[in-house]
Amino acid sequence: MARLERYIQNSLPGNKGAKIFNDIPGHTPPTLRKGRTNRILLFNGCFNPPHRGHLALLEHTFHDCGEDLNVIAAVVLVASEEFLQWKFRRQSRDLHLSDQQRIRLWDGELGRANWCLACPEDQWWEVSAKLKLDLARDGFEVDFVRVAGGDKIHRAGQAHGQWGCRTLITSDVCRRVDFFEDGEAPVVLRNHGPWRKVEVGEDILREQARQRALHSRSPEGTVTGEETSLDITQSNPVEDDALTARIQEEYLRSLSLVNKRRLWICDCTSNSRGYTLRFIASDDRLSPDFSSTNLRNIIAYTALGELEDKLQGVALSPGLLTRFILDRYGI
């Protein structure tokens, strides 16, 4: 095994070994394993500004996309300022945050997660190319999976293949989709085969339960940057009994979550590249009014003295976003 962090540190331009993921006690850091595909979520967008719905979609996808994918981390790809200016060229008075400001807004919320980072979208081709090369050299296989909101996936059209991703994942956690109603199976999409429930094998659940139990027992709850082998035969019988109990506890917890999860997959039939689409139905949806457009309207029509209160529960890092807006007015 090896930490993903050091590979990203070496791939990001100008990073110079800066910390990527937070160390959170009891939580496994993004860890690479040989013999299986290590997947990383890519979530791209303008995020002008990012809101609670964006974060909910990312967290929901990371935790519920299926153990068979072996997703170990996520990267938020923030669109360039040039793209933002082009997209909002007819709305010159709208809020236009720089890419670094939008990244800082994400960073302010990601401090409690040790599996995600935000970076400029226009750097990603270079970063991912070096990352793949370095990982392949050391014997690790990596693949990228794109996350898209419900507004990007429709009955009549889907955007497969962006960033070279063969798997696309969406959810209705923050925005309804037009192909699913509660209590029913998803509607078959154009140029796609029938939906089927994702089944996760017992062997995968037990192995992941074992890894979590081993991680929780390690001295500092971390994995070093070098490849590491964890051998349960080195512990004494008391520790082995405790470890066995912990593995069973982790397995039963995972099994309960899998049984409750509503996760479907379908195959794209319009090409031979093996594109697949996953849909995660949510039992706890956020307000359908969460959108960057509505958030910009709140900012535009709220008195500056009341702005931070209005942004609570809606925007990511509301205090910092308020500071950016006040700076814009020289206040």
Image (cartoon, helix red, strand yellow):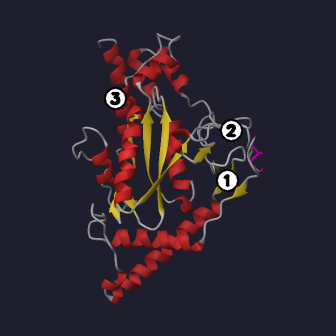
Q: Is residue 186 on the magenta stretch?
A: yes
Q: Residue at x 59, y 66 (%)?
A: 256
Q: Nearer the viewer, residue 175 or 1?
A: 1
Q: Which residues are magenta?
A: 184-190
Residue 75 is inside the magenta segment: no
Main secondary structure of the magenta stretch: loop
Say which residue label 3 marks.
Answer: 100
Q: Which residue is mark 2?
A: 177
Q: Amino acid at mark 2?
A: Val
Which quadrant of the view contains residue 15?
Answer: top left
Relative to 273, 316 lies left or right: left
Instruction: Inspect the image, locate mark 1, and give the three-letter code of the amino acid beneath it.
Output: Ile
Q: Is residue 87 left or right of residue 272?
A: left
- Residue at image position (37%, 35%) is 123
Give how far across and how far down residue 63 sits, in percent.
51, 54
Q: Quadrant of residue 3?
A: bottom left
C-alpha separation, residue under disc 2 versus residue under disc 3: 31 Å
Task: State whether residue 114 appears in this view.
Answer: no
Q: Is residue 323 above or below residue 270?
A: above
Q: Secondary structure at mark 3?
A: helix
Residue 265 badge: 1
